Amino acid sequence: MLKIEAQARAVQSQKWSAAAGQRLTALLLDWFARSARFLPWRQNKDPYPVWLSEIMLQQTQVQTVIPYYQKFLETWPTLAKLAAASEEQVLKQWEGLGYYSRARNLLSAARLVINLHQGQFPSTEKDLLSLPGIGEYTAGAILSIAFGKKMAAVDGNVVRVFSRLTAIPWQPADPDQRREVRRFVENLLPDACPGDWNEAMMDLGATICRPRQPQCPMCPLNEICQARQLGIADQLPMKPAKKPVPVKKLVVLVFSNQGRFHVHQRQGKGLLAGLFEFDWFDWGEAAAKGDPDPSSIQAELGKRFPKAAIRPLGPYTHAFTHLQWQMDAFLITLASQAPFDGQLDVQSHDFWATPEQLQSLPFPKALDGYRQKLLPG
């Protein structure tokens, strides 16, 4: 059945291409010459800034990325300078941008380019795909924009545009269907200026052929768009039913002693790895009685830390892409007078941070609101 569906999509796309494919490039590039967005990474076709921008733009909107991109290049203007940075420095610079594995992959890839490619950014798809954090779309964008190679850059936005142009319900989240679109797009790419063609398609998907309320009257391709002619542009691509997002209820404990705050660094390669955080409350066997409310948590903390001053810091909900944290937090000011050296314990990856240190550490956005409550001013 799936094979038959793929064949049907191929036949339909070929019919559309025969009728409108050649017209597409002329219309698209003429519109791009008049309406291209002014973006800082488009001012330099060097592979390093192109790569940096593409990694930052994964799962993140353009306006959010711009200040991070500019600050990143101010701090590390060359690939070699980035490769020499520490992971903690890069994570701190990335703080608030989210999806922190991108930052760790960025640093790892920079070091590989320096060590394995003599500092020269790879110019083949095979070599680019061997670098952490680079997939087919990012490789296509880098090769076409920075090296002028005839490579397609197909992400969910491009799948949406071509789903509407051809009236084929391609699913952006389906890897096989995305590759179908890539093969289709490769036959449409012009030999000249493939980078401009890909960037024009990015702009079209971001500003006109939007996920909701597409601006069809303003679209430079509306005369060759099957979905518009059929009146179904806002229905394509058909979206699969959303799965419920799992909710995790957590209690944050902020231990304070002599004006310092206990923090530790998350290890491994999972969610928020490499970032610093406060402690978490283990509700233990009491969790079987149901979700604890703030008053019962505070009462339990009073039993566990009878000599400490305990103050609630309030609730906060943070949404990740596929997970939601619902948190309550408490500041626990200890009465002990233990000495501090301010050094990170390399075994447990924790230490007592001054307010200045706390501000300088890379923290996840999920916990930054609590951190800000602890800082002066």
Image (spheres, grey):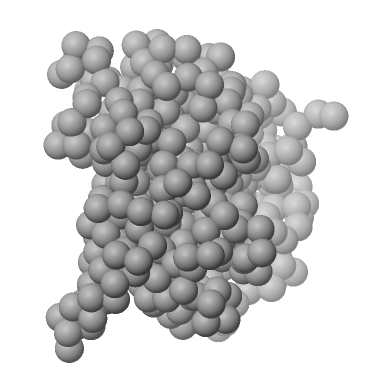
In the displayed image of the protein, which residue is found farthest to the bottom? Answer: 1
- Residue 310 image point, x, y percent: 74, 51
Vertical order, 1 against 47 (above or below): below
In this picture, is 313 found above or below 115? below
Drawn side of residue 34 relative to residue 269, left or right: right
Front-most of residues 34 and 179: 34
Q: Residue at x 42, y 28 (%)?
A: 50
Residues 273 and 107: in front is: 107
Does any portion of residue 45 appear in the rendered image? yes
**For the C terminus, which image quadrant?**
top right
Q: Identify the image quadrant of residue 362.
A: top right
Residue 27 drawn at (x, y percent): 50, 49
Depth order, front residue of 61/230: 230
Classify residue 250 as left or right of residue 113. right
Q: Residue at x 50, y 75 (%)?
A: 227
Give percent across and percent down for residue 68: 58, 30
Give residue 319's quadrant in the image: bottom right
Q: Position of residue 60 (x, y in %)?
A: 54, 47
The image quadrant where one finds the N terminus is: bottom left
Q: Is residue 75 above or below residue 321?
A: above
Q: Can you see residue 286?
A: no
User: Residue at 81% across / 29% down in the picture?
Assistant: 376
Residue 130 figure quarter: top left
Give the total number of marks visible in the rendering.
0
**Left or right, 48 with reference to 337:** left
Q: Nearer the viewer, residue 144 or 20?
A: 20
